[in-house]
Amino acid sequence: MALAAGFHALWPTPLGVHRHAGAEQLNPLLVRVFGALRATQSHARGEPPGGAFFASDDDLLHRVQLPEWQTFVRFLVESLRDTVSQANRAAWPGSGVDLRIAIEGLWFQASNRGAFHEVHTHGNCSWSGVYCVQVDAAEQREAHTTHGARNGVTRFYGPSFNHLAGAHVDLGNAYLQPPQVEVAPVPGQLVLFPSWLSHQALPYDGALDRLIVSFNASVHAASGSDRVHGYAAA
């Protein structure tokens, strides 16, 4: 591709943040439903109840059968549709593409007493998301004597992060700073991110469990053809 003269900002990292309008009614219901599922799945796995960390099976999309849950899933899909459309505005042909969004896995996680999730990415999908169901109120969470304001936050590492160890830093590459972004957990908040983006959940300790819903999704053209820029996506 020949680039025109001028400035080009290449390979941006898109991130979408959305808020569920009905979170105050939805989240207490999810706490009860997930509590029952955790008890059942912990028993089936032979795990002790009330551990510091728990991750459910990733089949919640069809396991939970409630009208409120179906509304929540539509919120996830529509939020992802909006974020993906904005991220690909310049890449898609014409005025846009009619999308078929497939949720490949949907699960919940509960953590407390210093539990955390190491740095990782998600495979077999193009986008992922994390929705906060429950966590201590911000003032209480950030007052933790050890973790402070980083108590239970999700940290995203930019594409340049792995190249910065020992690298030269001056005003010329100040645009690379900071190499990571920390997103605080807020009940009702959904954060959408490319699945290749490295991230981790920092240690959390609180009166309430840090309860989140995570999911992976693939995005295709409703026509069945993902051909863009002369090649077909795998």
Image (spheres, rainbow, N blue to C red):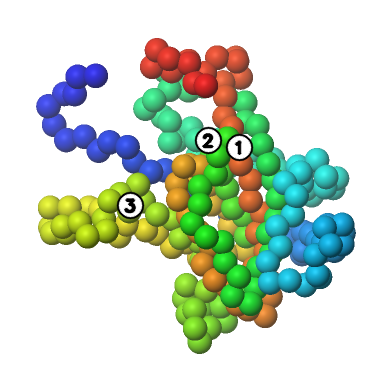
Residue 35, percent across and down? 81, 64
Q: Are marks 2 and 1 in contact (CB under 8 Å)?
A: yes
Which residue is found at the position 20% from the left and 56% from the top?
Answer: 167
Q: Residues within 10 Å of mark 1 (few under 14, many from 20)?
A: many
Whole-Å distance between the Cαs marked 3 and 2?
21 Å
Residue under label 2: 126
Please report whichever mark, 2 or 1, sits nearer to the chain's N-terminal start: 2
Residue under label 1: 217
Residue type at numbered disc 2: Ser
Q: Based on the displayed image, in which of its 4 quarters is residue 4 positioned?
A: top left
Residue 57 lies, with reference to residue 202, above or below; the image says: above
Instruction: Report the residue that reaches farthest toward the front.
Output: 46
Instruction: Report the residue that reaches farthest toward the bottom.
Output: 145
Whole-Å distance between the Cαs marked 2 and 1?
6 Å
Residue under label 3: 162
Which residue is found at the position 71% from the left and 62% from the top?
Answer: 54
